[in-house]
Amino acid sequence: MKLLLTFLTVFILTYSSFAQNEEALLQKVKAKMEKVNDYEAAGVMKLDVSFIKAPDSKVTIFFKKPNKFKVKKADGISILPKGGVSVNTASLLPVGSYQTIPGGKAVVDGISTTIIKLIPADEASDIVLSTLYIDEKEAVIRKAVVNTKESGGYEIGMSYRKYTTWGLPDKVIFSFNTKDYKLPKGITFEYEKGGAKPVDDKSKNKKGSVTIVYESYKINKGVEEKNFL
Amino acid sequence: MLTLTRIELFKIFKKARTYIAFGAIGAIIILIQLAMYADGESYLEFMLGNINTAFEIEGNKLNGYFVFYLILHTLLVHVPLLICLVAGDAVAGEANMGTLRLLVTKPISRTGLILSKFLASSIYTLLLLTFMAVLGLGVSVALFGVSDLMVQKSDMFILLDKADVLWRYAAAYGFAALSMITVAAVAFLFSVFADNSIGPIIAAMSVVIVATILTTMDIPIFNALKPYLFTNHMLNWKGFFDNPVDLREVLKSAGVLVLHIVLFVSLAVYFFRKKDVLS
């Protein structure tokens, strides 16, 4: 009995010390991001979805605390997946109470990261589980896998270069699942090529991605509200 | 030949029915533009319903390029019917009025006469398309401004950069001209056989309607027929709004249409030369 009690005490102490470590790391990442009140960034957006053909476009990205985020193409049209607000790294960190679970270590793009799983305590939260891959040395999130109730699962990969001190990425890749897209030809009045039609491979992995390469940031210079309309 | 064509054009534009097509096209274009101006967002919501469930589309979606594409999508199916009104009347109308016999007694070749009539019908067709392009694109751009163009296909959603759109419209205009001249050639051929313009006009309209229905119905038995229907190839003006443009398919369709024009006009010349003109 004494042995069992000792084992349990050691286990609880070890677990809570790990949890404290993870929490401290999260706070470190958060503190870095807290320095950014707003930004206006210029970048290039690339959309890769099997049924959408859109050219790479120059975009302006606006962010304002706590979670206002907008991607705009000047005089043009931009397409983002719903839930695309998470292309913004600040939204990856939880608001309100949550539970952290240590997930061990992993290597992302050749960089050693610490895995932290986050479970929001709020039952109304759309996010069910977030798994963050945190670069301890730079205190930045390198990768995140998020499972939601409404939008399914998505993954965000981030790489950093010039703006690491602000915790802002130079490149974000947002990967998501896509659904089928079909419209009747009676509506589209389309030309029929003839010949055998390609068989629709249902088993094909229907994944899509949005890549934003940030070229420059204007940090904490103020962003007007109208940019988020 | 030039003088004959000019005379034929004079005859065409002296008839009130010639202006029905201009009036109808003008009215449809203005109605579409007004409807889009008043409640275009609802139409967009309906049109993008499929894609809006998964994606957020930001920007000036309801722009002049989009409205003009919508106008072309609607009108290029119906304009052939209006073209039949003039092309079907070209020879049969003269026979009906009793002037054809007089005309063929003049010291001009029958081939020259029939070709000048076809040329005049083709010029009328081009004028109608130009009117449609100027009114459709010009007013739409003035009302809605310019932005990237969204194009929906049955299995694809295409977004074209606004700087990459105008040349496509110019190319589509050229292709549409070929398509409409093909319809004019069908009506013109029928016109040679009749002494009353109603017959060839209705016959040509019927051919266009039946072939269009076969083209648009996505039923396997009809799908096998589609590569042989000129109405199917007429729809390939949309090929210029693909990215990248499948030039081989577009040129193939253009070639098929040119062949149809040559065939129908040759038959018209052949039968007119042999025709016993009694009226």
Image (spheres, rainbow, N blue to C red):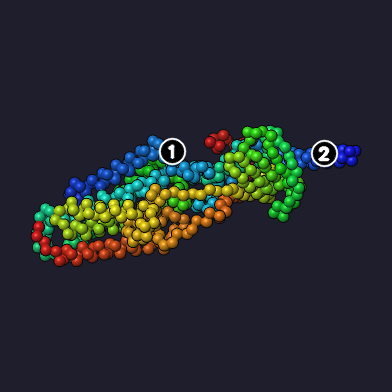
- Mark 1 burial class by Cα count in 10 Å: few <14, some 14-19, many 20+: few
**Closer-to-camera residue (A105/B163):** A105
- Dot 1 falls on a residue whose secondary structure is helix
Amino acid bearing label 1: Glu
Q: Amino acid at mark 2?
A: Ile
Evaluate whether residue A139 shows in this view: no
Residue A165 lies, in percent from the top left, at 71, 44
Asked if marks 1 and 2 touch (Cβ < 8 Å), the reply is no
Which residue lies under the disc numbered 2? A12
Identity of the residue drawn at 80% across and 41% down: A15
Q: Quadrant of residue B239?
A: bottom left
Secondary structure of residue under mark 2? helix
| Tag of residue B140 | none
What residue appears at the point 76 percent right and 47 percent down from the top-left corner?
Answer: A104
Image mark 1: chain: B
Front one among B224 and B133:
B224
| B256 relative to B115 in the view: left or right | right
Which residue was labeled with disc 1? B41
Counting other residues with Cα less than 10 Å from the Cα at mark 2, is it few (<14), some (14-19), or many (20 or more)?
A: few
Question: Which residue does the image show at 69% across and 48% down from the upper left?
Answer: A142
Chain letter, disc 2 residue = A
Quarter of the image for the N terminus of chain B: give it: bottom left
**Are the residues under marks 1 and 2 on the same chain?**
no
Q: Position of residue B108 (x, y in %)?
A: 14, 64
Q: Nearer the viewer, mark 1 or mark 2?
A: 2
Q: Check the image and name the residue furthest to the front.
A: A1
Q: Residue at x 30, y 55 (%)?
A: B211
Residue B21: give x, y in percent of width and height: 25, 47
